[in-house]
Amino acid sequence: MLGLSLDFRIYDEVMMTNSANPRFFALIPCAGQGSRAGSLVAKQYQVIAGQAMVLHTLKAFLEVARLARTLVVVAPGDQFFGQIQDKPFEVVACGGTSRADSVRNGLEALIDSGAAPHDWVLVHDAARCLVTVAQINQLIDACQQDDVGGLLAHRLPDTLKCEGLLADKGRVAATMDRADKWLAQTPQMFRIGTLMQALDVAVGAVTDESSAIEALGLAPKLVPGSAQNFKVTYPDDFVLAEAILLNRRRAD
């Protein structure tokens, strides 16, 4: 495992190349099984509003003109995208056993295909199918001149309760101050080289890219997102996501 001192040297070298007109890449980890959705089909491939969820996700990214390339990371043996002809995105079967592994392998694939360590990558959940072009561009605008990068996030609107342990499990142990609490969303945008190093040195499981960046002692920028940019996870989420997609279609 690399030491933190080495990581910060690499981070400094990456930041010295800021003037090299960095490009923007999208990376969509799509190798999860989505067991919490209660279906035998991976949730990103379940049909919502007439097509697989991940295709709604990809549609938004493919309409962002500033993205040089969109890369989808699937599990080895995944044949879903084989049925799509003339894909305007790339698919690599290098998904790992965890989200972090899939993202790390996808970053390696970007580098192998010509991306540079100082280029930006926007990592987005395949199951956040309600993200909009405007939100993606908002993140790019907010972070492209930032020293660290950042993520879309939504201020916690509800009262936050802490659950008790052992005999008190299932009961409220405390009410937490929500004033400084945000719900992390995606995309999350960081320099490719910095994020690769952050994932390499992250201790324990990280559930998003920002967590890995934070472990390097860096502070990602919080960019206000939308309550509609939620991660479709549970059965009820599918109903709500479809309603929103159909409403948008009628509005268009």
Image (cartoon, helix red, strand yellow):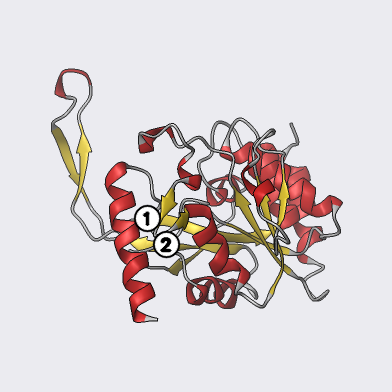
* Residue on which the image places disc 1: 183
Q: Residues within 10 Å of mark 2 (few under 14, many from 20)?
A: many
Q: Residue at horizontal 55%, vertical 56%? A: 124
As drawn, is 175 to the left or to the right of 232? left
Residue at the spot of label 2: 153
137 lies left or right of 242: right
Q: Is residue 15 above or below residue 39?
A: below
Q: Position of residue 120 (x, y in %)?
A: 70, 64
Label 1 neighbour load within 10 Å: few <14, some 14-19, many 20+:
some
Near-viewer residue (22 or 106): 106
x then y, percent, for residue 69: 73, 64
- At mark 2, the secondary structure is strand
Q: Quadrant of residue 3?
A: top right
The answer to whether the residue labelled 2 contacts the one labelled 1, judged by CB atoms less than 8 Å apart, is yes
Q: Residue at coordinates 75% horizontally, 54% vertically from top-left? A: 193
> Which label was assigned to residue 229?
none
Taking depth in this image into account, of 11 and 91 the one nearest to the observer is: 91
**Label 2 to label 1: alpha-carbon separation:** 5 Å
Q: Position of residue 152 (x, y in %)?
A: 47, 64
Question: Mark 2 or mark 1, which has the lower sequence index?
Answer: 2
Is 159 drawn above or below residue 189 in the view shown? above
Q: What is the residue that sits farthest to the top in this orientation?
A: 167
Left or right of 227 on screen, residue 167: left
Where residue 91 appears, as percent x and y from the top left, is 71, 50
Secondary structure at badge 1 equals strand
Q: Amino acid at mark 2?
A: Ala
Is residue 220 among the parts visible in the rendering? no
Q: Is residue 80 above or below residue 168?
A: below
* Residue type beneath disc 1: Leu
